Image (cartoon, coloured by chain):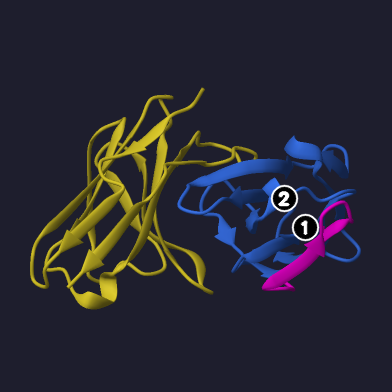
């Protein structure tokens, strides 16, 4: 069994300040973990993924995430938010070759 | 670049109509998926297919069926559309065989049933 919880449904930051989007997961097996971004009226785009290699994963657009097994977390961070980062973000867990489980999403607002 | 295309971006149908949503991928992926996206509920899996003519129910298959006659094409069918099927529908595809493979998504079809 697998599940994922995104701890914040909405996050608001000012442009130029750090971004933290939190994700906790549960899995019976060593999972892969993914972060996707969805801009308005668009499909989902992969930001980064963890597949049991390095625990600190770097993605596109300056985002990175750290896999912490002891905390069962995979939080997404970015040092400095840009207006174009405003979007919805999804954390995804996949424990085997079958189905993925998506979190409910976090809407990121970036204020000028 | 992987490309997943969906037949319509916006669709308006009447209650009781039969609705076909088409998805095509060009990367020779074995797996294909149909999701429904509603505000606050994330993505919910309707059906997925891991090979031609093979399908498995997802979390919310009621009221839907699927067809996969060719590897690159996966169709979602609403036999008799109802207003509670008004939603954003997302198609995705991926390689099979390992948990490491990410899914690639189409742009979505926003379906309104009146």
Q: Are marks 2 and 1 on the same chain?
A: yes
Q: Position of residue B40 (x, y in %)?
A: 54, 74
Q: Is residue B11 magenta?
A: no
Q: Nearer the viewer, residue A37 or B67?
A: A37
- Asked if labels 1 and 2 touch by Cβ distance under 8 angstroms, the answer is yes
Q: Which of A10 and A45 is in front in this view?
A: A10
Residue at the bottom extreme, as displayed: B84
Binning the other alpha carbons within 10 Å of mark 1 as few (below 14), some (14 to 19) or many (20 upward) gives few
Q: Where is residue A82 in the image (x, y as percent from the top left)?
A: 77, 48
Binning the other alpha carbons within 10 Å of mark 2 as few (below 14), some (14 to 19) or many (20 upward) gives some
Kindly identify which residue carries mark 1.
Answer: A112
Kindly identify which residue carries mark 2.
Answer: A83
Q: Mark 1 falls within which chain?
A: A
- Chain that is coloured blue in the picture: A
Q: Which of B59 and A103 is in front in this view?
A: A103
Which residues fall within the magenta stretch?
Answer: A6-20
- Residue B105 left/right relative to A22: left
Quarter of the rendering containing residue B83? bottom left
- Relative to A104, is A46 above or below? above
Q: Position of residue B33 (x, y in %)?
A: 40, 48
Residue at image location 11% in from the left, 73% down from the top? B15
- Residue B4 left/right relative to B41: left
Residue B1, visible in the rendered structure: yes
- Residue B48 left/right relative to A93: left
- Relative to A4, is A66 above or below? above
Residue A59, visible in the rendered structure: no
- Mark closest to the chain's N terminus, 2 or 1: 2
Residue at the left extreme, as displayed: B17
SS label for mark 2: helix
Of tags 2 and 1, the one toward the viewer is 1
Q: In which quarter of the image is the C terminus of chain B?
A: bottom left
- Chain that is coloured yellow in the picture: B
């Amino acid at each position: 069994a697998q599940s994922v919880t995104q701890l914040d449904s909405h996050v608001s930051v000012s442009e130029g300040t750090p971004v933290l989007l939190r994700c906790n997961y549960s899995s019976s097996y060593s999972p892969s973990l993914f972060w996707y971004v969805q801009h308005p009226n668009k499909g989902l785009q992969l930001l980064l993924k963890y597949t049991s290699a390095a625990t600190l994963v770097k993605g596109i657009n300056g985002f990175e995430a750290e896999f912490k097994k002891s905390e069962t977390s995979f939080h997404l961070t970015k040092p400095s938010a840009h207006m174009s980062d405003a979007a919805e973000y999804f954390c995804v867990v996949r424990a085997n070759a079958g189905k993925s489980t998506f979190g409910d999403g976090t809407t990121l607002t970036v204020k000028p | 670049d992987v490309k997943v295309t969906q037949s319509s971006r916006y669709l308006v149908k009447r209650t009781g109509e039969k609705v076909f949503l088409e998805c095509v991928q060009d990367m020779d992926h074995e797996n294909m998926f149909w999701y429904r996206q509603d505000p606050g509920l994330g993505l919910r899996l309707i059906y997925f297919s891991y090979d031609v003519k093979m399908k498995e129910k997802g979390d919310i298959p009621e009221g839907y069926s699927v067809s996969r006659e060719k590897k690159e094409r996966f169709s979602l069918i609403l036999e008799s559309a109802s207003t509670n099927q008004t939603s954003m529908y997302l198609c995705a595809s991926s390689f099979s065989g390992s948990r490491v493979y990410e899914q690639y998504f189409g742009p979505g079809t926003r379906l309104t049933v009146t």
